Amino acid sequence: MLHEILLSLSGHPSPLLTADHSAPSSIFSPSERALLSSVAHLSELHHKLIANTAAIATAHHSSICQAIATSISLTHLTQFQRKVLEVEDNILRKDSASVGAYNIVPLTAIVQQFSGWTRKMEWFTEIVDFMMRGNGVDGRKCSGAKAINKLCDAVQTGYTDIEEAALSLVEVAETAWLKQVSAWILYGRLPSFGREDFFVQNTTKDLEDYQVNHELLPVFVSAPTAASLLFIGRSLNHIRVRGISHSTSPELTVPSSRLQQLSTLKFPINSASFTRVIATIRLSLSQTTLQKLLPLTRVVDILSLLREFFLLGRGEFAMALITEADEKIRSRWRRADNLAYEKRDGLGDIVVKEGEVSAILARTWAAMGLLQSHNEDQDEDEQLELARDLVRLIIMKGTSTAPSKSSPLFNATSIAPTPFRNLLLSVPVILTLQIPSPLDLFLTPSDLQIYSSINAYLLSIRRAHIRLTELWKVTSLRRDHPSPPGPPYGSSKSGQAKVYTLRKRAKQRSVAMRRVWATSSAAVFFLGETEAYLQGEVVVGTWSGFKTWLNGERPHPSISKSTDDDEDIWLEAALESAQSQTESRHTHDPQTLADAHRKYLAALSIGLLLTKSSFTDPLYHLLQQIDHLVALVHRIHSIWQSLDLEDDEGVVDAFSDFRKEEKDVKGQLVLIAEKVKGAIEELVRSLREIDQEKEGWESGFEELVLGDEGVYVASKVGRVDRLLMKLDFRGWFVEETNKDSADEDFYDAE
């Protein structure tokens, strides 16, 4: 019986322990059955652990879980088997601790020797079951990070034996995790085994772009540390894949200091010490390799290009692009009208093709070059040449305008999905940038998506403003054209009748256009003030603060010069020393620049109200109605010209009924003018709600209190209440409401 018990504890199933001894005819007493049940439970746990750890060690997808299972099997289960052999040896040697008088071995003595192992084996079984079934909530398998977090929680138990076992398994798990991390942060390579369990994953679109899966991160890795890990590995992988470095392989140039930094980590890993080690490795990489590949001057150049062309710093570029786009649309409509007599599918010819979109940008660059050629004294514009090589105008084939979810800064403040990109042409087009090779360490595709969204937003407002102001260039709409005849013909009866007819016609048209001109003036004022706020305050203020931080400039108080020459000399020397220390202290590494740039884009998007769907959706509706209003004004102008030819010169178009078209267009003008006024009123109401919420100040500028020295903090620019003080349309809304009935009576009389 003793031999059977020891064999079952060694992991071999025994019918003696698995049989049912609850029958009255059983040879075991109740106390013996209780003792055998505890031994059977321990034997069952041991047998289950042997099978499950072997299955995990051979088939689990996570190398960390495999390491934990192997450690349980080779270390702790081996210790248990040694304990079984030790008890057996004591029995054979007739040790008094196990063998009593008359060579009797009490069952209680054997059970007492294994009493401390029951709790440990139950805990090992819990850990193994957790690794096999996962978290049990969403059905996914257990990851290495979840296993590490589970073990770290078990360290804090009140049992000493469980704590010691948990500490040993934590060391094994974290060592396996560090091996994966070291391959990434030292060589820029993903682990060859267990890649799907690693927290850095390839994006589906680009095999050379990576993102962090925060669900696969242990609890001691913070979000900024994860961003540093991603940046270090992505930079090394970029250098290795693109062949930028002059060395043959990154493995040959890994400094021993980085390996020494990793070797200083103690288990269990502390979050503060791990963050310090990763920050040291990142700084070492930036000072040795990345600082030469990506100097600050090149970063400032590309950011200035984005500021000038994407954020409309150069107004002439926006003007030229809008002009060329409108000319292309007009030419397509004229072509469709000409083909309409032969083909009835004229609308299919209005759609702009991708080659024509590229031609629009090419003609824009030609117009910019022509403007530059007029200034003979001006030097060659290198920024314009760089933009000509990198900036692209493309048709957007996707439907998403928001940045990717991998950007941690836009989880709470995502850009509204309002399709401003549809307003420039008849197809959704965006302005994008072809990122040069070293600069993709700093700029990401999600950053360019934000720039494209902001560009489409600002460009659509500028376009509507230009189209409205161009209505005032149509002189015949604002003045009597042709003018009434003067004397001597105007004094005759026929001349007086002519004058009366022309003046009556001009008065009727003036009354018909009164509401249109009032609404257009209000829309021009609204767009002008809104554009001045967005461009003059938000964009300029945010960019100036970001550029000041890039250059490491700090405002110094003005000190009046003393009359003593010696004091001036010492003072200048002290100021030069302080300035040199400041410049050396503010040398930013590429990841700091990338993080600050994302904060800059987040602050810019919030300040431009581009994250507020309650503002962007009514604004998009207003811009659409303005396009409709401008088209109707040009249509009524062409109708009146045709009617003037018909009445004055007798030129009749037999295929058109201009009287009926005039009546229809007048009615549409009234409706569209009312819609424009309603859209402006809704936008002002939305601005008041945004001013009451104050969300931009709370979410975008919290780090003003918590930020450390040298960390970029977005400037406080753009106050909505200042814009609301200028947009006071209350009197216009009230007056227009009172005049509605009178205008309707006038049109009914006509």
Image (spheres, helix red, strand yellow):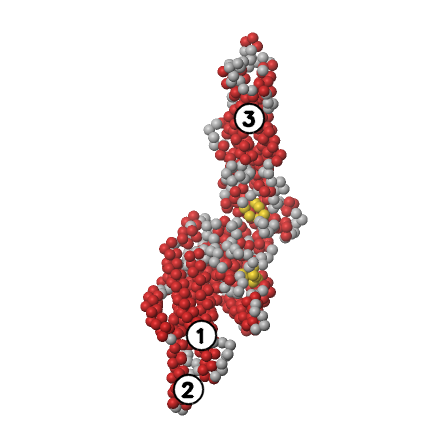
Q: Which residue is mark 1?
A: 660
Local secondary structure at mark 3: helix
Dot 2 alpha-carbon crowd within 10 angstroms: few under 14, some 14 to 19, many 20 or more: some
Q: Nearer the viewer, residue 665 or 291?
A: 665
Instruction: Determine the image quadrant of residue 694.
Output: bottom left
Separation of marks 3 and 1 at Cα, in angstroms = 93 Å
Task: Choose top left, top right, bottom left or bottom right for residue 517.
Answer: bottom left
Q: Is residue 559 visible?
A: no
Q: Residue at x 43, y 69 (%)?
A: 668
- Name the N-terminal-most of marks 3 and 2: 3
Amino acid, disc 2: Pro
Mark number, residue 485: 2
- Between the C-alphas of marks 2 and 1, the distance is 28 Å
Q: CA distance from mark 3 to mark 2?
A: 113 Å
Sequence-wise first label, 2 or 1: 2
Determine the residue positioned at 57% across, 55% down. Answer: 439
Q: Earlier in the sequence, mark 3 or mark 1?
A: 3
Q: Which SS class for mark 1? A: helix
Find out whether the residues at labels 3 and 2 contact each other: C-beta distance under 8 Å.
no
- Assign the N terminus to one quadrant of the image: top right
Q: Nearer the viewer, mark 3 or mark 1?
A: 1
Q: What residue is rendered at 54% in x and 19% in y? A: 20
Residue 698, how many percent across, how many down?
40, 51
Residue 471 picture location, percent across and down: 45, 73
Query: Which residue bears the numbered disc 3?
Result: 45
Q: From the top left corner, tell me how far across and down residue 206 is, in percent.
A: 59, 51
Query: Which residue type does callout 3 highlight?
Result: Leu
